[in-house]
Amino acid sequence: MFDLFQKGEGNVKDDSLSGLTVALALVPEAIAFSFIAGVNPLVGLWAAVFMGFITAAFGGRPGMISGATGAIAVVAGKAVVYGDQVGEGLGLQFLFAVIMVAGLIQILFGVLRLGRFIRLVPHPVMIGFVNGLAIVIALGQLDFFKSNGQFLTGGALGTMIFLIVITMAIIHFFPKLTKVVPSTLVAIIVVSLVSGLILDSRTISDILSEQTGNGGLSGSFPLPQWPSDIPWGDHWSFILKTAFFVAMVGIIESLMTLQLIDEITETRGQGDRECIAQGGANLLSGLFGGMGGCAMIGQSLINIKSGGRGRLSGIVAALALAFFIMVGGFIIVKIPIAALVGVMFMVVIGTFEWSTFRSFGKIAASEMIVILAVTLVTVFLHNLALAVFTGVVLSALVFAWERSKHVHVTLLKDDAEERIYGLEGLLYFGSVREFSDKFQAKSDVPNIVIDFGEARVCDLSGLEAINALGDRYKNAGKTLRVRHLSHDCQVMLEKAGTLVDIEVLPDDPQYSVANLKGDGEVKRLLEPELAPNDRS
């Protein structure tokens, strides 16, 4: 990545100014995602307030910003459509119900400490995720180059591009003069003044006018309202299913963003705590009329770049946004869209892993395929959960394929009565077939020894393969002995009534295989499969 982010600790001044900057950047994003979900802009804006405040105060990653997001809007928007089909005016009620149930699921996810599974995400998946998000953020800015559905042309386009370049230049060069004030905030203020006094450029008010016919932004603090008009008993299946997808998308995007911020700041967040906070935020967001959300990678990076490190930055951002909605909307709508687009383009530059291009030909082709696959799924399907899942599955398949080819057998001793084989590699579900094919019981000598000193039995499939091999040698009238198995393997094989002789030696290795609940389960899973007419 470009070196756009500071790694130091934040303070009250930096967190406060950074929070104010983030609040300004949250406005157009929340409005845009509201339209994606098919709801009033205030629904998205208040979601950003509740999500931002609660996760900043109680979440597991200080400095990370949460709010209404496109990923949540796409999934949750289905509840609005479904609700309107059930009854007129029920779309919002279904949306709020889904968001509240999703919050409960996320809280349960955190309480059960399932956030740790984010550690299973390989680094190539993380690179693909970050690159895909950077491209999605960049493409998302193209809509701001349109007016009433048509791309800008002539002087309007030139003004837009000029102000974007000015914004990006200020963000890049201003820190070389001073870091007392966040360069992003300075850029927004300067470009707003240039737009208002010299150049006529499109503003947030213009976007609102095109979408709603009203260029103003104002609203009172919402009151809690339970979605009581919904016939829960008749539609619980849809609500639960949609809520589950909302919860999983939110968790994955939040934990991936948390991991990215961890790397940038060289600190470590708490995934399970973040899940609980996200769940609580979504629960209250739905109760108070918000569309829910999760961590926002763009705004989080703006916060980090502007010096926001503590919880205060997110709290200030949420409170400032609430102030804008209730009091200062007439000022916010005057901000030129070009300034916010320039800010997001700088986020894109700082987010994209430019080292990916230098990695071609230097890393394994399989890892590059994983990076490209995750990036493409993110860009074209806009489904972050599916992108991460695809990357994890591909990485697992690549690992299994590669490891299955690394089981080697060497002949340590060979005479007419006894042969000793040395095994190297990992014996698990992906390599048991190759392991089994390396031994020919019928043509082997009477006594066979397999030395596992340079190998590791990783799972139950490996133990079953040893047992099955013993059965083959027994049927051929020959003896199979194994040595240098871990104590764990020895115990499990003995409990299953093994068909091999196990040698216990002083230098046996110590490692564990997958734990099983009891002797009966070990025996049931390892015993040879009998033909139907052989069963008693």
Image: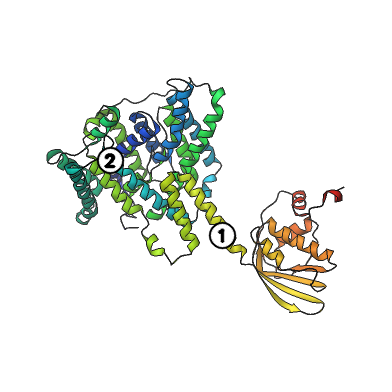
Give the quarter of the image for residue 39: top left
Gap between marks 1 and 2 measured at Cα: 43 Å
Residue at 56% x, 60% y: name it: 399
487 vs 300, left or right, is right
Front residue of 181/498: it is 498
Q: Disc 2 marks which residue? A: 144
Q: Is residue 3 visible?
A: yes
Q: Is residue 503 visible?
A: no
Image quarter where the N terminus lies is bottom left
Q: Disc 1 marks which residue? A: 399
Residue 164 in picture, x, y percent from top left: 22, 47
Above or below residue 299? Residue 231 is above
Identify the residue at the far right of this view: 536
Give whichever of discs 1 and 2 has the lower sequence position: 2
Residue at 30% x, 40% y: name it: 143
Give the quarter of the image for residue 5: bottom left
> Residue 278 bears which disc, if any?
none
Residue 7 in picture, x, y percent from top left: 34, 55
Q: SS for tag 1?
A: helix
Above or below residue 519? Residue 413 is below
Residue 198 in picture, x, y percent from top left: 12, 41
Residue at 53% x, 49% y: name it: 117
243 vs 2, left or right, is right
Q: How many residues crowd around disc 2 within 10 Å: few (fewer than 14), some, or many (20 or more)? A: many
Label 1 amino acid? Answer: Phe
